[in-house]
Structures are given as C-alpha cells and as structure tokens.
Amino acid sequence: MKNLIRIFLLVILIFLLSFTLQAQEHYAKLEKNKNIQAKGLIHKLNETRDTLILRSDTKINYLYAINKDYGRDFDVYIDTTHYRLPLNKLPQGKHVLVAVQSPKRIVFVVRILKDIPREKPLQIESDEVVAIEPRVLPISSNN
C-alpha cells in the first residue's frame, strides 16, 4: 500500500513538472492591468504567446510602447474595438504598452522572453535568369 502511494505521488510530481517545463517555451509574458477602470479592455496573449490580442466594448484609439529611455518603440492608430499585435516586431526585453481609450489610458507590461521567429519570405526556386525572345508572327494580307 505504501508503494502504491509513493508511485502515485511520483506520477503527480512528474505531471506537475512537465507543465513548468512547458511554460518555459513561451515567447512572452503579459502583466495585466488589474485596475477596475481597465476592465473594459481585454488584453491577453494567444496560445503560442507570440501575438497580443486587444478587445474592448468601446473603441481603442491608439496603442504605443514606451522603452527604458522614455522613448516610443512604436505608435499605432487603431480606431477599432479589437486589434492583434504580432510581438515579433518588438525586441527582447520589457515593454510598457499604453492603450488609449479616450479619455482613459490603460497601461500594461509585455516581457519578450526570447526572440520570436519572423516569417521568412518565399525563396525563388531558381537563381538563373531566363530571357525569352518575343515571337514574330507573320503578317498576312487578304489580297
């Protein structure tokens, strides 16, 4: 009976450790704004944590990010109730994002844990340049 309990506890421990190891594979971490006035803005990451999803009942006017030098990383005019921001545009590190819903400004933090791979453009199958001469069609007259 004791062995059964030990085996059961070991299985639970391995199961819980597998979740913590899987959590380290994510690209970003979101620190939400928990203010009551910010409840109108739903801000979350998608399942792969490479895109920020913003949704609200009222219009989101503007989104910008502030870096550590108090400069802006990016400015985006949204003017809609939902927006998806791909996080591969942001460098690794801490980013303070501000969503403007006139007159409110909702501040939250996104930490980019590791570089997010960007989509590679399609490669040309052949590097050779092929030139085709135009065909000259014979002109016939109806005489």
Image (cartoon, rainbow, N blue to C red):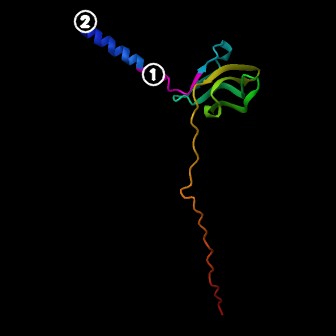
Label of residue 100 in the image: none
Left or right, 77 with respect to 39, comes to right
Question: Please, is residue 10 above or below residue 140 in the view?
Answer: above
Residue reaching furthest left?
1
Whether residue 26 appears in magenta in the rendering, the answer is: yes
Label of residue 2 in the image: 2
- Residue 3 in the image, given as x and y percentages of width and height: 24, 9
Whether residue 94 appears in magenta in the rendering, the answer is: no
Question: Please, is residue 142 above or below residue 52 in the view?
Answer: below
Q: Secondary structure at mark 1?
A: helix
Left or right, 104 with respect to 2, comes to right
What residue lies at 77% left-to-right and 20% top-to-bottom?
A: 103
- Residue 35 in the image, given as x and y percentages of width and height: 66, 13
- Quadrant of the rendered image containing residue 85: top right
Question: Please, is residue 93 above or below residue 35 in the view?
Answer: below
**Residue kind at label 2, given as amino acid type:** Lys
What span is in magenta? 18-29
Residue reaching furthest top?
2
Sequence-first disc among 2 and 1? 2
**Residue kind at label 1, given as amino acid type:** Leu
Q: Secondary structure at mark 2?
A: helix
What residue lies at 46% left-to-right and 24% top-to-bottom?
A: 22
Which residue position is annotated with label 1? 21
- Residue 26 in the image, given as x and y percentages of width and height: 52, 26
